[in-house]
Image (cartoon, coloured by chain):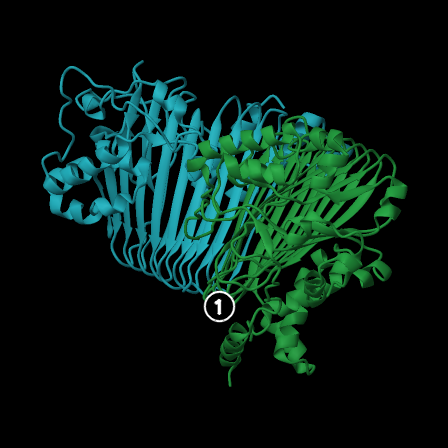
Chain colours: A cyan, B green
Amino acid sequence: MPAPRTIPFDYPVPSASPAPALPGDGLPWLDALRGEGRRLSAGGLPGTRTEAWKYTSLAPLTELEFSHPAATLTEAIPAELGPGAFDALEGPSLVFVNGRLSARHAQLDGLPAGLRVRGLAQGLADDPAGIEALIGGTEALNGDLMAAFNAAFGADGCIVETEPEAAGKEPVLLRFVAAPGSEPLAYHPRVIVRLGAGSSLTLIECHEGPAGAPTWSNPFVDIRVGEGATLSHVKLQVEGDGAYHTALTKAALAGEARYESHLLALGARLARHEIHVRLAGEGADCQLRGGYMARGSQHIDNTTVIDHAVPHCESREVYKGVLDDTARGVFQGKIIVRQDAQKTDGHQLNRTLLLSPKAEIDTKPELEIYADDVKCSHGATAGEPEADQLFYLRSRGLDLRTARKLIVQGFMGELLEEVGHEPTRAVLAERVAAWIDGGRS
Amino acid sequence: MSAQQEAAQAVESYAGERYKYGFVTDVEADSAPPGLDHDTIRFISAKKGEPEWLLTWRIRAFERWLEMEDEEPTWAKLHYPPIDYQEACYYSAPKSDSDRPKSLDEVDPELLKTYEKLGIPLQEQEMLAGVAVDAVFDSVSVATTFKDKLAEMGVIFCSISEAVKEHPELVQRYLGSVVPYSDNFFATLNSAVFTDGSFVYVPKGVRCPMELSTYFRINAANTGQFERTLIVADEGSYVSYLEGCTAPMRDENQLHAAVVELIALDDAEIKYSTVQNWYPGDAEGRGGIYNFVTKRGACRGANAKISWTQVETGSAITWKDPSCILQGDNSVGEFYSIAITNNRQQADTGTKMIHMGRNTKSRIVSKGIAAGRSDSTYRGLVRIQPKAEGARNHTQCDSLLIGAECGAHTVPYIESRNPTARVEHEATTSKISEDQLFYCRQRGIDEEDAVALIVNGFCREVLQELPMEFAVEAQKLVAISLEGSVG
């Protein structure tokens, strides 16, 4: 029997008492969206026969019994959350606990002029029409199952907007932290980012959670970068080792806009970071950089689609990873060049270091090209640290362990150099160093 | 007149040209009625006087195929109307089958004329090229040359139906051992209804003294061709096999589902070269061959080597990925491919390299050239199994786009499960460089010749892998296939 295209998934588990309403329930447009999301998600999770999920099986997720996300809405948010990765950073921040915005942890004093940050649940109460315009109708779901789960069961999130020509100095930090009990917990935050023409912003997304907690985080980040605007989007994923993380980020770029994505994924039992970028205006520029480091039996999937819809755009993509023990990495990168997108310049590279005999990488770099006057290329490599690099270091007196660490450090270090905001880069570098020190090899 | 206008005109004039090899030979065929059921299979089997085990095997495949109704592959980037398998004819042999010719003099003169039009007069080849030809004309071999010389060396080169009669132990041992009858939709169909093909066995330590070659030719309208080729290279042997084809012009789409199995034992080497130039359909994509091929080679023994080289310029639809299963330690798999698509042609072709043994190596060089409104896809898999210590793969696939309406796609799958393995993949897509064109034009080479020159240069790495006999033809083909499509 061939594997199914979808896996049946009883989510949420039926409970005796009806779940309390989600924020915004009763708004006709939102009811329609959630209804469509429920209809699509009732079909189950994408199975491995779906080409985009060929290498990542969500079957283990179906073994967990999640109650309705609305059921946790009434629980009190703990005052103490433990240290966060970006605590040292100054600047505005929002903290989401179990998917809900925590008012008492928010730090929104002294927002620079032209920057607006607000919670989604609150926004639905204050300004439903404005939120409707931002979220859009059901067509935005576009058959994507994970987006459907997010639409159907999303309770909170936030909206980050800049006015034209606004330039924020400090990054905006969005911290998502799980503080669950022993029960499995799922949340589906939605983040909406809108950059006005000529503005610039650094946005940090951080996902954290305690060890062992069975959580499922399914964030959807919807980004539009206006004409000539620049967004630097940093994401650190350090979820607990019992966590499932299925993130979808969609970015649309207007003319001359620039989107940089810097992802560092170290956490979760199973994580998938899916990024879709649409270059919709001439001269747009997209830079995707991702790092993944996994050990134990972790599974980290990076799936990207860069869609060149118009001429004269550039995209650069570099994903690098280190896999130890029985960890499995997946990279699926697709570059589409539409018929009109002449003079496209696209380059993609995936490199993976395998540190253990049981580690596995599955790579699928894909070019789909319909225009002739283009320059596109991709490359992929996989293997253990190079013997001559090791020899070089050992011949200078370093022991094998130190030499290997140094090579891994250098391999990942290249990625971090591109992060523009110095304190943020330092936090990421520290995480990479800590990961390397935590290994046996 | 701008280069683009010139190109547009040239394309039009080319589209108007008739397919160079488009002619139908009038040979009375002894065919099975259209349709496919148990009786068709019994008919084919009886017609060929097959032993019971083979009929059972066919029936088993057919029954599996019936269960596969929903499994017709859809993953390829190909678009074509659904095929009605009950409409095709599954057996057609030239009338002369009942009394086979003993020499070329006895061969149906119509057939000989056909070969002449194709430029492969058998007599000449006997003398000049030193190539033994097992010419397959509508599914049944009609002439085999150089048999004696090969027999002297112990090399068996005959049609597969003959091999079933003469060497049943070899056929029974190896048939379906690389591509099992349940492998995939088209291979299963082939297993049920295959009519003929070639069989080669090279005994231990023998270096086959000549290139073995089969010319396939699709004839009689509405006849699907289901070739089955089986090549076994015993320990320490070497064989080079050439396969080339052209087909007459016609309007209905023709289904072709071939299976090729290669087996290389310890220290053996098989080189398999293909030039495929079947009718690609007219400028609007009407007619043309549907070519669904399963080709797979197994390096069973240590230090075995299998090398695939292909030049794919024909067919409306090409679905094909010659693969290597590298089981033996230190075995080597190679894949060199040129795929040229023009007008409305679609090709989804590539390779699979499955590394199982230690220190296995594979090399993939794929050159895709898309022109007109065609779509060309490279789809390849490199899999490193956990035990493939020290495996090595290098993949290079380059695409060249000619014209604004064609598509070139690259879909490599890389699955590495051993850290000592080194896997590298590179791919580029671009158009013909203006600088190179300018350089050639400035030296007085006209545009069309310049493009042919540049494209031939682009393909050089693959062309030089072809045996001499093919290299010349292939170079011409590359130029002819793109004639008029470029500015």
Packing grade of label 1 (10 A; few <14, some 14-19, many >=20) is some
Q: Is residue B318 above or below residue A388?
A: below
Residue A437 visible in image? yes
Give me the residue at 40% from left, 40% from top.
A274
Q: Is residue A169 visible?
A: no
- Dot 1 falls on which chain? B
Residue A270 as seen in the image, left or right of residue A400: left
x and y percentages locating residue A44 in the rendered image:
31, 29
- Give SS at disc 1: loop
Determine which quarter of the picture holds residue A255: bottom left
Q: Point out residue B324 in the picture as x, y percentages from the top left corner.
A: 67, 39
Q: Quadrant of the C terminus of chain A?
A: top right
Residue type (three-letter) at the residue carrying disc 1: Ala
In-image side of B2 versus A206 (left or right) = right
Where residue A416 appears, as percent x and y from the top left, is 51, 42
Question: Which of B214/A43 is in front?
Answer: B214
Q: Which residue is mark 1?
A: B283
Quarter of the figure with the N terminus of chain A: top left
| Viewer-nearest residue: A197 or B321 | B321
What x and y, as percent, mark residue A349?
Answer: 55, 47
Q: How many marks?
A: 1
The residue nearer to you, when weighing B442 against A222, is B442
Instruction: Write down the quadrant of residue B227 in the picture.
Output: top right
Question: Residue placed at 20% from the left, 46% from the top?
Answer: A137
Q: Which of the two residues, A430 or B216, is positioned nearer the viewer here?
A: B216
